[in-house]
Image: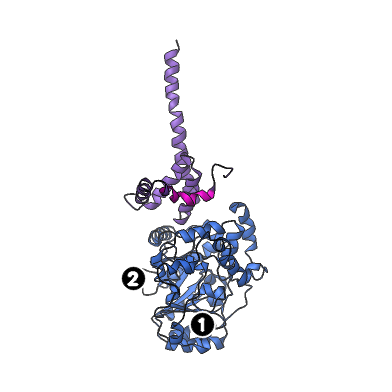
Chain colours: A purple, B blue
Amino acid sequence: MANSYYDPADLRKFGNITEWSEELGSKFFDYYGKVFEEGALSAREKSLIALAVAHVVKCPYCIDAYTKDGLQRGITKEEMMEAVHAGAAIESGATLVHGVQMMNKYNKLSM
Amino acid sequence: MAESIMPQLKKAAKKSLKARENELAHTEKQLEVLNGGLFADGELPYFKDKIAEIGHSPLRPKALEILQINVGYMCNQVCEHCHVDAGPDRKEIMTRETMEQCLEVIRNTGAHTLDLTGGAPEMNPNFRWFVEEASKAGIQDFIVRSNLTIIQANKKYHDLPEFFKKHNVHVVSSMPHYTRGKTDKQRGDGVFDKSIEALQQLNAVGYGMPGSDLRLDLVYNPSGAFLPSDQAAMERDFKKALKEDFNIEFHNLFAITNLPISRFLDYLIASDNYEDYMYSLVEAYNPAAVENVMCTNTISVSWDGWLYDCDFNQMLDLKVASKVKHIKDYNEEVLNDRNIVISQHCYGCTAGAGSSCQGTVA
């Protein structure tokens, strides 16, 4: 067994998940492939969204994958960092907006 | 790790591997890397086994279309990714005598494209004479691969755009990115600005303009251990950025994969990216690209007249597997009846949409 929860080499084994559930695995990968095709949004724009989400969900595999994908698409490091900030801003906003709940509760309990 | 090693690499890349006496300057060492490791351990399949699955082993040529001549390894730049290991310190230059032998072939070939490359081909002292003579053969598409900065490098090169125009040369130029940072990181400080000026000069004489017969195409190589993306999308981004920022026009963008040989191989190993890169190439293997891989329609001639299946095999010193091995004995019919020499670097030409000196192939 690996003595770490995350091994970079596991990323290239991602496709192996179909071995234990072919139907669901295949459906997922078909869906995944379709999602990232050119559509109303360009594949480039979707790559930046994926990079931002990868940071928000803190997936090291996804961060590796979409940093490389961005480089391949000619996305600049400035664009990548702005995407990460967009994700981080939503994530911190999601925390901070709960501050309103705290304030509501505080006010309700206070005389 | 890759980031921490980059400044050292950048410093070191001011000289060729050969001048640095790097062991990867020896082709047998490169082939040892390409044939060993992941492939010898059975983790990744050998290229010959992969193409055997679709009935393409041995790989055979189709009709010859492109005659590519490397007129020397001398260059004014020392790009980190260069598969030629070119640079100012390389002295291998095609002689006039070998050029005469090439001209004889050019006059009689069935190929429709003549493709001059280097190094910086313009640095060969007989370059202009060779272009003048070769253009008389009336070959349909006459390409010169120019690195752009050469036009700015010295006063004697300033008139190259006019010279190319006079001989109706199709100019193909490297441009790794439309931003300064990425270009200079791969090709050296100041390269971006000089390249932009050179492109503007080429535009000024009519090259690359919409509807112009003076063809100007750009070559994009990834500036690191990753593969190129969709060529059409990259072309769109390049056109938009170069037009908006610098009012530059060009015709097509060729996205070319960096093959794991020479300086790029050295970079991959030094930055601990070699294994991942080989996995990426094998994972991106596209059987449809095998059909049109460039070695099936190209012959590559080295500065000293030897014949190869492609410029990459030339740099690995893998000569054609034919009775005819040298330009002085050139015989197109005999040459076309040969098996193409392959190794694991060939995965670079079959990844994704495929890669060739003319861009994607699938």
Asked whether, in this view, residue A23 is left or right of residue B313, the answer is: left
Of residues A93 and B309, the one nearer the viewer is B309
* Crowd band around label 2 with a 10 angstrom C-alpha radius: few (<14), some (14–19), many (20+): few
Pointer 2 with pointer 1, Cβ within 8 A: no
Query: Disc 1 designates what residue?
Result: B128
Q: Secondary structure at mark 2?
A: loop
Residue B262 location (% of width, % of height): 58, 68
- Spot the residue most to the right: B21
Q: CA distance from mark 2 to mark 1?
A: 27 Å
Image location (x, y in percent) of residue A46: 39, 48
Instruction: Say which quarter of the image contains residue A52.
Output: top left
Residue A78 % position (x, y):
49, 49
Predominant SS of the magenta segment = helix
Please give the name of the residue rendered at 36% of the width and 49% of the height, measured from the top-left corner. Answer: A26
Label 2 vs 1, first from the N-terminus: 1
Q: Chain of mark 1?
A: B
* Circle 1: residue type: Arg
Tell if the residue under mark 2 belongs to the same chain as the one under mark 1.
yes
Q: Secondary structure at mark 1?
A: helix
**Which residue does the numbered mark 2 point to in the structure image?**
B211
Residue interval drawn in magenta: A8-18
Q: Position of residue B125 (x, y in %)?
A: 57, 82
- Asked if residue B119 can be seen in this view, the reply is no
Rendered-image quadrant of the N terminus of chain A: top right
Residue most extreme to the top: A111
Residue at the image point whose x is 33% and y is 71% from the top? B211
- Neighbor class of circle 1 (other Cα within 10 Å; few <14, some 14-19, many 20+) is some
* Closest to the observer, B291 or B98: B291
Q: Is residue A13 magenta?
A: yes
Residue B116 vs A30, above or below: the answer is below
Query: What amino acid does circle 2 point to?
Result: Gly
Chain of the residue that carries numbered disc 2 in the rendered image: B
